[in-house]
Amino acid sequence: MTAAADWLAAASVDDAVLALRPDYRALLLVAEGLRGGPPDEDSERLLGAAEARARALVGEGAPEALPHPAAWREAYRAFGAKPQRTRPSVEALLRRLDPGLPRVDRVTDAYNAVSIAHLLPIGGEDLDHYEGPAALVRADGTEVFDTTAGGEAVVEHPEPGEVVWRDDAGVTCRRWNWRQGTRTRITHATTRAVFVLDGLGPLGVEGLTAAADALERDLQALHPGVRTARRLVGPPDA
């Protein structure tokens, strides 16, 4: 089992990605000692409050009109993705505010709550299912991505040049933050997880840090005794 500090230190963002968006920062937050399971009253309270805040932030406009979701649309177009078809994760969640987001589990609901309340993409993955460190790269198209289609397990490959998170075994998340794979997904058995908080210029390091602080507080409330560690990854000045 790789220590959280060592795993975080080995995570990287490739220069080819930063060439697309020099303002990109990832804040990686590792949590150990989680107690997974189905949604409960506590996770429902967190997600319900976040939905109310997000509805107020979006107002009568479209989610993609907000500065940070709009910047993510631009980032997708920079590597050839069409955000109208494959939406950045935060925009996809915000579009599901009415009648309400699906309730998934105690861990996923917590990071989805922070995502919509702070208007940034967040992904959560089971750290024990990683093989090596996380790296954000532009794919060559041969990488393996485990997913499902029609209820069946399938293997896909990203498009050449697509921005993906990967480890030594293959892709863990396609199109920056669009779709997570099945191999590292959060389950009720997850006790160690990494959360990837994605930030661009309109959010700023302060906004990214505030979202991480909120997620840390919520995880501590839902999972007493949880241990956390974090690292900001990006350009040399990050």
Image (cartoon, rainbow, N blue to C red):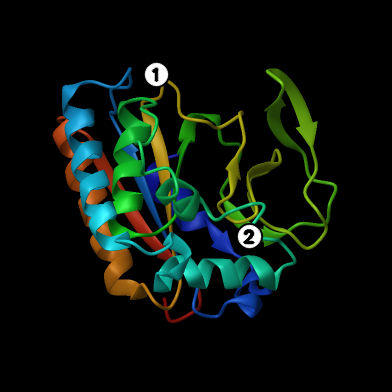
List x then y, in percent, for residue 137. 67, 60
Q: Indicate left or right for 57 with 133 as reference.
A: left
Q: Indicate left or right for 20 with 162 as reference.
A: left
Q: Is residue 99 visible?
A: yes
Density class for disc 1 (Cα within 10 Å; few <14, some 14-19, many ≥20) is some
Residue at image point 55% right, 52% down: 177
Q: Toward the viewer: 146 or 31?
A: 146
As measured in the structure, the alpha-carbon distance from the residue carrying label 1 to the one carrying label 2 is 31 Å
User: Badges 1 and 2: C-beta atoms under 8 Å apart?
Assistant: no
Exactly how many numbered labels are in the figure?
2
Give SS at disc 1.
loop
Note whether 204 is above or below 62 in the view shown.
below
| Quadrant of res 211 | bottom left
List x then y, in percent, for residue 189. 41, 18
List x then y, in percent, for residue 39. 29, 22
Note whether 160 is above or below 92 in the view shown.
below
Residue 231 image label? none
**Amino acid type for the residue under numbered disc 1:** His
Q: Nearer the viewer, mark 1 or mark 2?
A: 2
Residue highlighted by disc 2: 83
Residue at image point 23% right, 62% down: 210
Q: Toward the viewer: 183 or 211?
A: 211
**Amino acid type for the residue under numbered disc 2:** Pro
Among numbered discs 1 and 2, the one appearing first in the sequence: 2
Q: Indicate left or right for 230 with 139 as reference.
A: left
Residue at image point 47% right, 55% down: 91
